[in-house]
Amino acid sequence: MQAYFEQIKTFMNLDMSPGAKIVVGMSGGVDSSVAAWILKNQGYDVIGLFMKNWEDDDDSEYCSTRQDWIDVVSVADLIGIDVEAVNFANEYKERVFADFLKEYSAGRTPNPDILCNAEIKFKAFLDHAILLGADGIATGHYARTRKVDNKAQLLKAVDLSKDQSYFLHRLNQAQLSKVLFPLGEIPKSFVREIAQEIGLPNAKKKDSTGICFIGERPFREFLGRYLPTKPGHILTSEGHVIGEHIGLAFYTIGQRKGIGIGGSQVGSGDAWYVADKNMEKNTLVVVQGHGHPMLQFSTLTAQEASWVSGQIPEVNKNFTAKTRYRQADAPCQLIASQNQVIENQFLLNFTEPQWAITPGQSAVLYDGEVCLGGGIIV
């Protein structure tokens, strides 16, 4: 265990040495709990903060925060820190959920966790922590930071299977300069070991999955509460009508299950995939086979670019990128548009075609282990 602590110390934010007042975002899960314990163990002045970001049907079986709060209080008591709860539900609805609905209404597939990190966990939460007199904040994210030439870099976690830099790519220099990621240097399996060894009450708690306000509930059921259905034709790539969709907002590029044409006798018998959505004509285009050409893309355009350093990376240099979280890094080049990169828009040219690149998702650029930033795919 001591060897890991030495690694952690090496990569801690040097502007916040032991003794600094750190507010830790605690969700009730094992990751944020161990992060708080590590900081307390290393001599930081630690306060726990539980964020309530969602209130609609919060007492349901899918998205209850009651047990999470109980777990936070139990952990805080065991490791000997104060803890408070703060309600960011209004900020979340205005800054994250409203954008989520707008994007789905436009036929895109957004990633609200990325916006939540940029607008809530590392903005509203950070602002609140500073008001409490904190020197910085910490979370249980699997990522790392380091300072090079007086600039903060965002790095992948050592445990690449848990790396969450993809979700953090919109953080800027002001935010990263105030953040600690205690888990970035250690594997997830060891985090569980620490939790069990020190007797955390949530040591065996299952990791949360999915979007916090949806939880484990059926996604289409949830979305249907907020967006109207608008049926239209399902077409093959040749233009043949083979079914009816319930509304383009309820489908995403590359989707295989739940299209509603599983029993169709049209075509080769291979599985059907969503390949395109025509918002103007309200038609859903589907193709057969995972390798269909309409699901392969060699280039993409992204907008709302956000660069960690505050500067556009070098154009025409070889990088790698992810167009979705659980994807291996794909070699690519950042290319210019009309001999220059527009400040808030960029293009990527991939060495090998990428499967089902999806508008609304984020394209995140890497230079080795360094996360450079990214943008929203259009």
Image: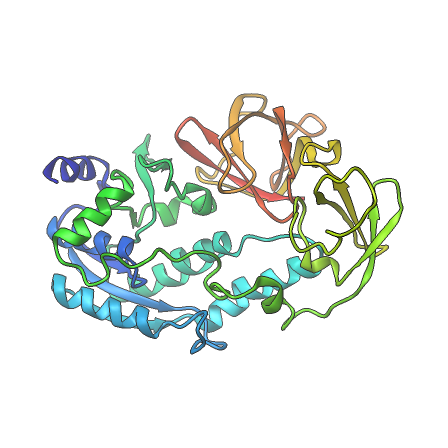
| Number of marks in the rendered image | 0
Quadrant containing the N terminus is top left
Residue drawn 48% across and 73% down? 90
Task: Quadrant for residue 223, please give it.
Answer: bottom right
Confirm whether residue 313 shows in the render.
no
Coloring basis for residues: rainbow
Q: Residue at x 43, y 54 (%)?
A: 117
- Left or right of 28 in this view: 258: right
Residue 300 x, y percent position in the rendering: 66, 35
Look at the image and tell me whether residue 30 can be seen. Answer: yes
- Residue 104 in percent (x, y) is at 66, 59
Q: Note whether 57 is above or below 363 in the view shown.
A: below
Q: Residue at x 45, y 47 (%)?
A: 167
Name the residue nearer the viewer: 118 or 183: 183
Looking at the image, which is closer to me, 318 or 108?
A: 108
Please indicate whether residue 156 sits to the left or right of residue 97 in the image: left
Tell me: residue 84, above or below residue 264. Answer: below
Vertical placement of residue 356 versus 204, above or below? above
Q: Which quadrant: the C terminus? A: top right
Give the camera-side residue of 281 and 284.
284
237 displayed left or right of 363: right
**Residue 140 x, y percent position in the rendering:** 30, 52
Residue at position x 89%, y 46% in the image:
240
Q: Is residue 318 above or below residue 122?
A: above
Quarter-of-image position of residue 226 = bottom right
Residue 143 in picture, x, y percent from top left: 34, 42
Q: Which is more toward the observer, 349 or 64?
A: 64
Residue 40 placement, left or right of 351: left
